[in-house]
Image (tube, rainbow, N blue to C red):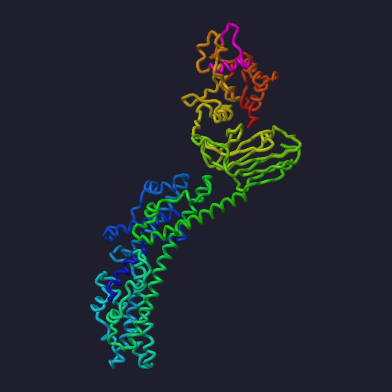
Amino acid sequence: MKIKRLLANILLITLILNSTVAFANSRTVAEQYGYDDARKYVLQEYRRGADGSEIPIKPNFPSDKEIEDDYEYELSRLTQRNIERFIKEYLIGYEEGYKGIREQLFGSEGEGSVPEVELNYAKSLGESMGEIYGYDDYYNNVKSNWSKSIPSNSKVTSMFNLNMETSQYRSGFLAEFRTYFKKAYEEAYEYALLNIKDVIIGSAVTNGKELGHVLGSIYGDKDYFEGKSNNYKRDIPSDNSIVRDYLLNRTLDEYRAGFINGFKLGYEEGYNDAYYNSFKGAVESGRHAGELKGELMATKDYIENKAMDWSRHKLPSSSMTNEYGLIYLSNVYRDSFLNSFWVGFAEKYEEVYKGLINEQVSEKIAYGIVPISGGRISSPDNSIAVEIHKGTFYNDIALSIERVLGDGYGVDESRYILASDIYNIQLSNPSQNMNNSNQISISMEYYGKNDGGIYKWVDNKWCYVSSLIGADLTVININPNTLRQGDNLYRILIDKNYDILTDIRSHWAKEEINTLVRRSIITGYPDYTFKPDRNINRAEFLALLSRVYHWQLPKSTKNINSFTDYESFGAATQLISYGIDAGYILGYDDNTFRANQAISYKEVEIIMGRVLNDSSFKWHDTSAKMLYDKQIRSKGYNNMDNKITRAEVAYMLYILNEWRY
């Protein structure tokens, strides 16, 4: 059989191999995606018939929006900063892939050319035929003259069907063939002069085997990519075809027989090697692609606190075919690639996830003894630190910081964004003695805005602790007695509902008001103001007490129906009913309650004594602390019948209850 499809098949196989996914260990996952997408695009245009002028030298990069749409699944849970990084790396890979495949197809200057095909086939064919003709001329007593013996360019073109190729390729092939024919012819002729006939005949097997290996390799590749079974006999040439195609009819009978046997051996070997290597290439590419994706998904799942389960990411074959450009390849290549992909994915996913868990466990606990002179202890990952100042405790204490694995502490994710892990701070102080006026500082790594802060797990919910936001840290200063025996859980949350109250930015009670707002105890007005210096009425005061002390309001309010102004209570009806029933607040002698009347310092003092069940409670204690800490003098000093302000109530409730946090 003639080898007239030899070069056409070489070109076809080269194109197919160049369109497969090739992964470079040095590329990031995003760069690899861009690299592959660019190659797929250029190859699609090339197969459509586009030439070098239609496919620009510089790529038309996809927009950020197009990249985000194409990789919506991969980017769905990444931060904006990481999305921007992904896009930047994607575009780097896209440019590399575009330029690489375009140069293969059209050359570096954009002039039309076919993909560069290895010309070692021309070398092998030229050497083998030159050797045959050199021996043949010697044994036929023809004077050595390679230029007369070499087939004409038209003969070589016809023999190897080079008319199917471009003129550029054809010229390169003929020049290569001519060079190696001449060299092999002269060496063979000289060798024949100096060696006996049996030795010459022995070289026939080698020559035949080399040429057979070339042709067998082509058909091995071809059968694999066309999805055919491994069968080297399917297209092997007959003896007559070998004699005719390689012009063996003029050679010695012994040489011809040796050549044919060697050709068949080489064809079988080349066919099987190529078939297996094509399969191996698909397996290796698929496995490598799976490992890259498995590493990415394992890291993603770990960061998002999802259980280790690689199978949640398994996609239909159709999706994988589109994602990795397998549509242009045979079913057998596609199946080999996909099977190996999921093997590599599963193994790498579990390896990376377990590695992250082990790393996490090794960084789980920090422990130390803090002397009476004070000290600082940081978590192993440096995400949180506790600083105790000298004189806070009167004896050495033990302190531990433990990173809590898993999250059994519910968060309303419609309102909050998780911005850190949970850390459990435990303090052991056997003497129970401390200087509670010395504050303990807790700092946590944070790079966000003022809508974030440190929260503590109190009464089965996350409660905001007044936080100072810095450039890369947020800090809370707490009283030592708030670090109770047992668990003290802290984390950073971002409050999506956080609104800045515009009229408290420079107010003396800013931190206290802001903290109670973040705890949903007090609210501002619709215009984002708090009006801190406005007086608070009796109903509003009861509303704050209800939120601070978690009152369970009654359904029946018959106990307050006797008040003559009952109809004016509105939304405060249940609050007033609860306050009256509990004995916290009373009506006036004229049988009115006056819900909208501003409340006095004296009334607040009486009510708080009842709520706290502390008859010794005095407003003076709060106003004295306010004067000392804030340099603000309460009007209660002048007359306890004066009316208390909203800011003063917020300050009082903050300092009375901060021990709980």
Q: Is 220 included in the stretch rendered in magenta?
A: no
The image quadrant where one finds the C terminus is top right
Give the residues in magenta.
573-592
Quick check: is 583 in the magenta stretch?
yes
Q: Residue furthest left?
A: 154
- Residue 353 spot, x, y in % from top left: 54, 52
The residue drawn where x is 40% and y is 54% is 34
Q: Quadrant of residue 536?
A: top right
Q: Would residue 379 appear left or right of 82 to someone viewing this image?
A: right
Q: In the displayed structure, does residue 313 sit left or right of residue 518? A: left
Observer-nearest residue: 548 or 444?
548
Where does residue 462 sit, x and y in percent of width and height? 58, 34
Which quadrant is home to the N terminus?
Answer: bottom left
Q: Position of residue 14 (x, y in %)?
A: 34, 66
Q: Quick one: which residue is furthest to the top in this view? A: 590
Residue at 41% across, 46% down: 72
